[in-house]
Amino acid sequence: MSGNDTDLGTLDAGRLAELFRSGDASPLEATRAALDRIERFNDKVNAYVYVDREGAEDAARASARRWGQGQPLSPIDGVPVSMKDLTEVAGMPAREGSLTTSEALCDADAPPAARLREAGAVMLGKTNTPEFGWKAVTDNRVFGATCNPWDTRLTPGGSSGGAAAAAALNMGVLHQGGDSGGSIRIPAGFTGVFGFKPTFGWTPQWPPAKMPTLSHIGPLTRSVPDAARMLNVIGRYDYRDPYATRGQPEDWGVDLECDLRGLRIAYSPDLGYAEVDEQIAARVREAADKLEELGAEIVEIHPGFETPIDIFRRLWFTASLEVWSQCDQTGRQELDPGLVANARHAENWSALDLFRGYADRARLTQRLEHFNQDYHLLMTPTVPLEPFEVNHEVPPGSDMRDWEEWAPFSYPFNLSQQPAASVPCGFTDQGLPVGFQLAGGKFDDVRVLRACHAYMSAHPPRFPAVPDPAEYG
């Protein structure tokens, strides 16, 4: 990098674009800095399961030529990005964490990959996920477990755990995740990064997720402006997604510099039914006070619904049953036993059970949308507990059966299809990240991003140092 000794591997997309424009750095240098961080850190956390060094460097050279000619394709031209391994990228495999898939290279880009490629972003590779994204931790029989950069004995959450770990260590700048029940927000909370689930249909995907009407595509980044930059690319209509809708903001970051005056935020410490670790509760309450200091009106109140875990399970377990039913006997033996257990549970349900689940889902959505007529945003913890040991679906020693029991704050907003984000807000006494969730009414994404940015600007997050398992004995 000529005339500048800044470590390109630590910079955000906005700063990189400034350097590309001025000629003080090139996309090839930024890409090599990101690849260097992957080489240094990935063995410790297993965030990436596929890295395309040659393809990334070729794309970065092409970007450098465009910047040199003053003709970048977008503000993120040349910015290094990662894709979740559930997303198809031309020329890369999509193992989806499953022994039932092959190493064959995809021949087409899914919508987020296509939009990022058109914008000139440099695709570094694919990040780890549990099998088909079925659970809220990240381990599978193909690539093993992803570890938390803050303590590599612990899970980063999931299912976008690879993307979250990559974001925490800046192994690339913009990271694509997917969220069907908390899969962006949970790992963002566990790793101390920003994660955003947009309104359903505003970030198209194809092929569809295993439970398509729950799934949202979104960013995991170190900052809200970087998330907005990514959304300005992937948050565009694509005809291939039958659930895609129009009406996205022309600029997802249009209100980021607005303050919080005039915002009425409902703060619910536990939604009226969840159990929350004392330290998590304390950090989130402190964050609510800080939002109030920034000008928002904070009202402690519950939105008034009972836990929708049974509604979610009727949909989620039925999706697992569909996966199981499409496998032959060999494939069924290769599936994650937890996924199989969910599938076999759903075998006992009738079509009427599923139909009633959709009716209950509609009533929950109606209640939340009604609630948002009185409150602009709803604030809760992101997750109610600290990260626990890797290779466990639930905290060891607990009496929990599956991940939905320890993630009560996330999946309600997949059922309602509303936008929601996880914002880092400090640490426990053990030095582990804590996050709070902000959710808004449908299509109120800009307002959610505005509030998240105001908080993170006033209270910048801290990111992990180089992970070293020896530190943990």
Image: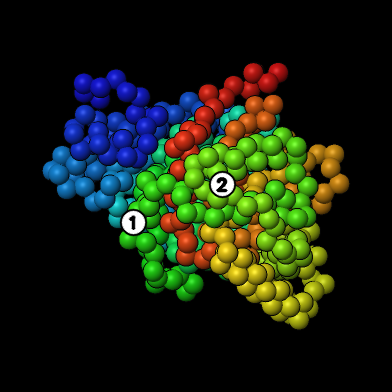
- Which residue sits at x=28%, y=47%? 75
* Closer to the camera in the image, 183 or 419: 419
Q: Which residue is mark 1?
A: 251
- Which residue sits at x=59%, y=40%? 289
- Which residue sits at x=60%, y=43%? 288
Q: Which residue is mark 2?
A: 422
Q: Is residue 234 left or right of residue 330?
A: left
Number of other residues with Cα within 10 Å of mark 1, as a class: few under 14, some 14 to 19, many 20 or more: some
> How far across and down, in percent of the image, does residue 370 sit?
60, 70
* Closer to the camera in the image, 357 or 155: 357
Q: Is label 1 in a helix, a strand or a loop?
A: loop
Q: Can the viewer see residue 228?
A: yes
- Tell me if residue 217 comes above or below residue 226 in the rendering: below
Q: Quadrant of the N terminus?
A: top left
Q: Can the viewer see residue 93?
A: no
Residue 245 lies in quadrant: bottom left
Residue type, label 1: Asp
Residue 154 lies in quadrant: top right
- Which residue sits at x=44%, y=37%? 457
Number of other residues with Cα within 10 Å of mark 2, as a class: few under 14, some 14 to 19, many 20 or more: many
Q: How many marks?
A: 2
State the residue lying farthest toward the bottom.
352
- Tell me if residue 361 comes above or below residue 431 in the rendering: below
Cα separation, mark 1 vs mark 2, equals 21 Å
Sequence-wise first label, 1 or 2:
1
> How far across and down, in percent of the image, does residue 83 sit?
46, 48
Residue type, label 2: Ser
Q: Is residue 367 left or right of residue 178?
A: right
> How far across and down, in percent of the image, does residue 54 sit?
35, 39
User: How is the model colour-coded?
Assistant: rainbow
> How far across and down, in percent of the image, does residue 323 sit?
66, 65
Q: Is label 2 in a helix, a strand or a loop?
A: strand
